[in-house]
Image: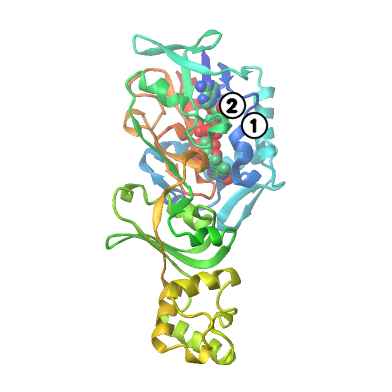
């Protein structure tokens, strides 16, 4: 019977500990005073724990290094995750976009189920309020970890310290520093699934306005980087909401180039249909001022901003709006331009892009190729995915495989 230390009591670490504990003693070390602090805030407190899609969509949703994930996903895929939680007593439900949530809508129930499995297992010891500072390696093989109070000797370490986003949850990137000491390289750490700063001052005026069924398009030169329909939100710094957050998974490699962005406020209407619609609205409001003629077409808060962009006199009578002015109005509605001013920071990012270079990890075992008996699991690895439960799926799958393989030897 060996001793395995799991560093980090998040999603990946808890899964790894539960899996590794068969014939081994497992010590799960967490710096916080409780397990699963980040898990608690996932899915706006409801925890979107995985996605019930088919396997092709699952791999498509993994935006960085999907091939690295083959073994771990096929070992413990989304169906297996749902089955695991159901058998452990968590009732789940599937919502729009195949997102899986606990039926109770409480992330605390997901944590509760994991904690019960951990507490019930006599082979697992949990050490809270304990921050691992270093991994001890002798002759290329793990022999222990150092904490503030001494060394814990062990036969294997599973490093599951998470990324660097939302650092108040305890994920401050400690694992990157520990692994770097043994020659691991860290792919550039960047915020992802994150809102954007936008230069236009009108975003602040529109703060709180949510737009549904709009298109959001990002281009780098002639290349369309992102163009999808959905929901977005104006904030005091720029833009956020599901569509924007999703788009951020695709733009990192274009960040050093010029990016252009625009919103199509009426994607269901082509330019001609939109113009006819405006003409109809103008007829209905024939004796009104221009500023009072757009109420059926656009959200009230947006009207003054659109009018300012078009530079049409808001007080002129609708019947004196010229054809050329109407064309400008159509242009603005179909192509509301925004000037990108950078991603928001890691403290607001749902995930960290980058991490331990996947070339240095054996994908079939999650073991380091540089240090024997050192395993990685979860967001610390340079793998990231779209929203929809896919990032937790990565944590469960890699945690499971790392736990299995650390326990096997
Ligand atoms: C607001 C928000 C909402 C999200 N919602 C979803 C969602 O609904 N669905 C989804 O799939 N994904 C979601 N995610 C992403 C998901 O939470 C992460 O991808 C996932 O938690 C990663 O799991 P992990 O175990 O690798 O890391 P973490 O959950 O970050 O856990 C790492 C743990 O390691 C501990 N630790 C760090 N350093 C040390 C150290 N030196 N010693 C001891 N312990 C240490 C930390 O305290 C932490 O508890 C969300 C993220 C955020 C921020």
Q: How many marks?
A: 2
Secondary structure category for the residue under label 2: helix
Residue 232 spot, x, y in % from top left:
53, 60
Q: Please tell me how crowded label 1 is: few (under 14), some (14-19), or many (20+) other residues with Cα within 10 Å.
A: many
Q: Nearer the viewer, residue 180 or 142?
A: 180
Residue 196 spot, x, y in % from top left:
46, 51
Q: Nearer the viewer, residue 71 or 250?
A: 250
Query: Would residue 231 be found to the left or right of residue 331 on screen?
Result: right
Q: Is residue 347 above or below residue 27?
A: below
Q: Residue at left 47%, top 27%?
A: 402
Q: Nearer the viewer, residue 99 or 301?
A: 301
Disc 1 residue: CB within 8 Å of ligand 1: no
Q: Residue at left 39%, top 22%?
A: 179
On residue 114, the disc is 1
Asked if disc 2 and disc 1 are in contact, CB closer than 8 Å, the reply is yes
- Can you see residue 57? no
On residue 220, the disc is none
Among numbered discs 2 and 1, the one appearing first in the sequence: 2
Query: Would residue 320 be found to the left or right of residue 355 on screen?
Result: right
Corner quadrant of residue 45: top right
- Can you see residue 310? yes
Ligand 1's quadrant? top right
Q: Is residue 282 above or below residue 39?
A: below
Query: If the image is split into quadrants, where does the N terminus sit?
Result: top right
Query: Would residue 18 be found to the left or right of residue 67 on screen?
Result: right
Residue 48 spot, x, y in % from top left:
59, 46
On residue 18, the disc is 2
Query: If the image is split into quadrants, where does the C terminus sit?
Result: top left
Q: Residue at left 58%, top 22%?
A: 31
* Coloring basis for residues: rainbow
Q: Is residue 15 above or below residue 351?
A: above
């Amino acid at each position: 019977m060996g001793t395995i230390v799991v560093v980090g009591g998040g999603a990946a670490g808890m899964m790894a500990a539960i899996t590794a504990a068969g014939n081994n003693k497992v010590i799960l070390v967490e710096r916080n005073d409780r397990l699963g602090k980040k898990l608690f805030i996932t899915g706006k407190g409801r925890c979107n724990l995985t996605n019930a899609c088919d396997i092709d969509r699952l791999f498509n949703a993994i935006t960085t290094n999907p091939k690295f994930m083959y073994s771990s996903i096929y070992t413990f895929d989304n169906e297996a995750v749902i089955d695991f939680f159901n058998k452990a007593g968590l009732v789940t439900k599937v919502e729009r976009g195949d997102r899986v949530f606990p039926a109770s809508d409480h992330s605390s129930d997901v944590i509760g189920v994991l904690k019960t499995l951990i507490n019930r297992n006599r082979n697992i010891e949990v050490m809270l309020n304990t921050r691992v500072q270093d991994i001890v390696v002798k002759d290329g093989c793990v022999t222990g970890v150092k904490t503030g109070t001494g060394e814990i000797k062990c036969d294997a370490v599973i490093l599951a310290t998470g990324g660097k986003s939302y650092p108040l949850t305890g994920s401050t990137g400690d694992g990157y520093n520990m692994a770097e000491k043994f020659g691991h390289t860290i792919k550039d750490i960047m915020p992802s699934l994150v809102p954007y700063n936008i230069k236009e001052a009108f975003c602040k005026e529109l703060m709180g306005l949510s737009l549904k069924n709009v298109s959001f398009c990002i281009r780098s030169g002639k290349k369309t980087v992102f163009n999808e329909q959905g929901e977005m939100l104006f904030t005091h710094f720029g833009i956020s909401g599901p569509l924007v957050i999703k788009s951020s998974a695709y733009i990192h490699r274009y960040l050093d180039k010029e990016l252009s962005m625009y919103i199509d406020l009426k994607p269901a209407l082509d330019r001609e249909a939109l113009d006819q619609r405006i003409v109809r609205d103008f007829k209905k409001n024939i004796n009104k001022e221009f500023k009072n003629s757009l109420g059926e077409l656009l959200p009230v808060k947006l009207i003054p901003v659109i009018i300012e962009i078009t530079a049409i006199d808001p007080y002129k009578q609708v019947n004196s709006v010229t054809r050329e002015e109407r064309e400008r109005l159509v242009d603005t509605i179909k192509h509301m331009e925004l000037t990108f001013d950078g991603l928001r920071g890691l403290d607001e990012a749902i995930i960290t892009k980058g991490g331990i270079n996947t070339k240095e990890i054996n994908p079939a075992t999650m073991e380091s190729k540089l240090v024997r008996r050192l395993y990685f699991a979860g967001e610390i690895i340079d793998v990231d995915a779209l929203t929809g439960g896919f990032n937790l799926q990565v944590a469960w799958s890699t945690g499971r495989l790392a736990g299995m393989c650390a326990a096997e030897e």
